Structures are given as C-alpha cells and as structure tokens.
C-alpha cells in the first residue's frame, strides 16, 4: 500500500492534533482540521489504511487514533528535512544579500562624499523592534541541541545548547511546537514573565531548555538591533576653515571613527513616528556634542518588510542645503527602486 500525499496530510493532521490535545483523534476532527474537503467516511477509510500500515494506532475500539512510533518517526524526519532545507536556502540567500548590501552601502557613502564634498555616513537597514519568525531545535549529539533562531529580515542566529540528557525526537518536536506556538511574531518586549512561566510549566522536566532558548532569542534580537555604520569622506571636513581647528577636527574625526556617537544620531533621525523623512540639524540642534559647529542632514530609507536605515551628511553650517536635500531625496527613490527590482528577481 502506498503512502500518497493525501494519507501524508491526514497523518500530519492526526499527529498535530494529538500533540496539541493529548486525546485520540477521530475522522470528524480531521475533516474540520484539514483543507482536503473530504467526507468523514473517506477520512475513516484513509485512517484505516494508515493503521494497517502501522503509522497510527487505535487505543480503544470506540476511540480515535493516536500516532505510533513509526508515525512519529516519519513526521519528525519530514519536518526536519523541510526545516533544514528552508534554513540552508535562507542562509545562502542571506549571505549573498548581506555581501551585496555591505558593498552597496559602502559605495553609497563613498559616492555621496565625492559628490557633496562633505563627510557621509549610512546605517545598515534594520527591522524596528525585531520580531521572532521561528525557532528550530535539532539534536547535535547526546549532550547538545542546536537552536536555529530566525528573526525579522530573515536574519539567522545559531546557538548550541548543552543538555544533561539525550532528548528524543518526540520531545524535540513537542518543544519546537511549544516554542513556536507561544513566541512566533513577538518582539523581546512582548515576551513576559507570565508567558515564560506557562511555557516552562508545559515543558515540565525540560523547562531549563525553554529558559535557554528564550535567552538565546533575546540575545539574537538585541544583537540585530545594534547598528552597523559605514562612513566616508571624513577628511573633507578639513576643507572648511571653520571646522579645521585642531580640536574641532579631532573631535569630529574621532566621532566618525568611534561610530558610537553616530549611532545615537542616526537612531534619533530614523526613529518611529514622524521622523521618517529628511531631518536637518543646524549647529546646537545636533544631539552629538562634537557636531555642534556643523550641520547634519539625514534621510531614512526603507527596503520593505519593516527594514529601515538612515543616511547622513555632515558639513559646515554654510553647506549647500538645497543640493544635499535633493541628493538625499534622489537616493531614497533609488534605494526603493533597487529593493523592488530585487523583490521581482526573487519572485
């Protein structure tokens, strides 16, 4: 007897329902649970075949079915193959995109510096308040579990977790379902103590794993929210006598080299709310002390999926504001069009 796609979908529905409820699953439940649009009688026949093939069991004559070890094995192997394939494909795509993005942003900063003759900076795009997309736990060996964490922007973080005892496939499956059911789509701020307590209670003796995974999720999201900043044209500052004073120039150049202060400026410029377009800081309006003798013009760019970054131009107060603003508006349009072209290629 062949395990065709219809039988596989029914088996998957039986297993998922049983994992959620712990109760034997009947044909009527499956008819509501799947999108197969099959009658209860047809589903009963298919379940009888699955039972004959050893994938499900009927614990009592009048009860529904539960998964057998063979059924669990097929489900786990299929699920793990799909997730591993997804992760591999996503990693390959992300490595290529990240390389392209880094090269592009460095080029943007360099071209802006050449065209304006001012100092320039640009932050890599980020998802504001990054949210978890999914978690995949898999066994490395008897004492270790690999936690693959995917957050918004398809950023992947791998964490190796130590465990005191070997975790079997069924337990890993239940932990994967528990974690993804509760955490998917949440930012770190939305994962509260009450939710964690419920998850740890449901995980039972494996509650420590839940705690470690949540810590790994928090670390992954916070790491992604750190700004990566590219700069160019710092020496252009020395072209302007009012900024060429040794102390002023030294402080400005240090700000560009340290980048921490630039992060404060760019985050302030690219924040949520009304600050999503062009911002102009003149002299003392700048949040960065070493730039109080300069003017700074920033613009937020968007790459879809909530991903935003900020580009800034730093020059003397007598900078050519009209040219700078026109240049930044043009850049916003070009980056938007570039993103749309990449989306079309991916589709």
Image (cartoon, grey):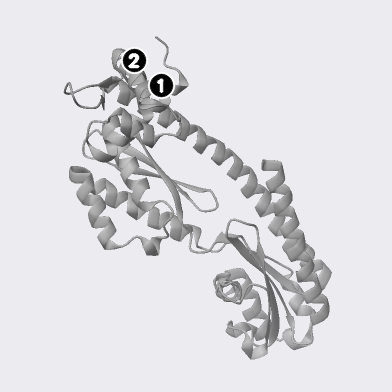
Percent from the top left, x then y, of residue 292?
64, 87
Q: Which quarter of the image is occupied by the N terminus? A: top left
Q: Residue furthest bottom?
A: 284
In depth, the one of 319 and 302 nearer the eye is: 302
* Residue labelled with disc 2: 49
Residue 7's mark? 1
Label disc, if present, on residue 119 of the rendered structure = none
Note whether 248 is above or below 147 in the view shown: below
Residue 275 picture quarter: bottom right
- Left or right for 201, reference 71: left
Percent from the top left, x then y, of residue 182? 34, 51
Alpha carbons under labels 2 and 1: distance apart: 8 Å
Q: Quadrant of the C terminus?
A: top right
Disc 1 residue crowd, few under 14, some 14–19, many 20+, Cα 10 Å: some
Q: Nearer the viewer, residue 221 or 133?
A: 133
Residue in the picture at 62% in, 49% down: 98
Picture quarter containing residue 246? bottom right
Residue 10 placed where, x, y %?
A: 38, 26
**SS at badge 1:** helix
Which of disc 1 and disc 2 is earlier in sequence?
1
Front one among 162 and 232: 162
Tell me if residue 142 can be seen.
no
Residue 19, compared with residue 232, is above or below; it is above
Q: Secondary structure at mark 2?
A: helix
Vertical comparison of 78 with 132: above or below: above
Residue 289 on image: x %, y %: 58, 85
**Could you tell me which residue is drawn at 32 percent across and 34 percent down?**
29
2 and 1 marks in contact (CB < 8 Å):
yes
Relative placement, left or right, of 119 versus 38 is right
**Residue in view at x 32 percent, y 31 percent:** 28
């Amino acid at each position: 007897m062949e395990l065709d796609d219809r039988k596989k979908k029914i088996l998957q529905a039986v297993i998922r329902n049983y994992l959620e409820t712990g109760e034997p699953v009947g044909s009527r439940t499956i008819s509501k649970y799947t999108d197969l649009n099959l009658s209860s009688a047809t589903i009963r026949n298919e379940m009888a075949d699955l039972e004959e093939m050893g994938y499900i069991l009927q614990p009592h004559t009048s009860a529904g079915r539960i998964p057998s070890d063979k059924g669990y094995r097929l489900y786990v192997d299929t699920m793990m193959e799909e997730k591993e394939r997804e992760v591999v494909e996503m990693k390959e795509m992300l490595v290529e995109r990240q390389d392209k993005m880094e090269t592009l942003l460095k080029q943007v900063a360099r071209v802006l510096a050449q065209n304006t003759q001012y100092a320039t900076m640009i932050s890599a795009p980020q998802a504001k308040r990054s949210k978890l997309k999914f978690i995949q736990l898999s066994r490395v060996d008897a004492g270790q579990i690999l936690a693959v964490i995917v957050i918004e922007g398809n950023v992947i973080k791998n964490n190796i977790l130590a465990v005191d005892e070997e975790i079997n496939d069924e337990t890993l499956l239940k932990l994967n379902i528990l974690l993804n059911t509760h955490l998917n789509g949440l930012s770190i701020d939305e994962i509260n103590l009450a939710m964690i307590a419920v998850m740890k209670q449901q995980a039972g003796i494996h509650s420590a794993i839940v705690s470690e995974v949540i810590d790994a999720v928090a670390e992954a999201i916070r790491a992604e929210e750190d700004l990566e900043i590219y700069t160019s044209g710092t020496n252009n500052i020395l072209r302007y006598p009012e900024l060429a004073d040794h102390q002023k120039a030294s402080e400005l150049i240090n700000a560009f080299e340290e980048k921490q202060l630039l992060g404060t400026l760019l985050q302030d410029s690219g924040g949520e709310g009304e600050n999503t377009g062009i911002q102009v800081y003149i002299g003392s309006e700048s949040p960065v002390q070493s730039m109080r003798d300069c003017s700074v013009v920033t613009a937020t760019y968007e790459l879809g999926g909530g991903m935003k970054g900020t580009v800034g131009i730093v020059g003397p107060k007598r900078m050519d504001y009209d040219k700078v603003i026109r240049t930044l508006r043009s850049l916003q349009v070009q980056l938007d069009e570039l993103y749309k072209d990449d989306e079309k290629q991916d589709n």
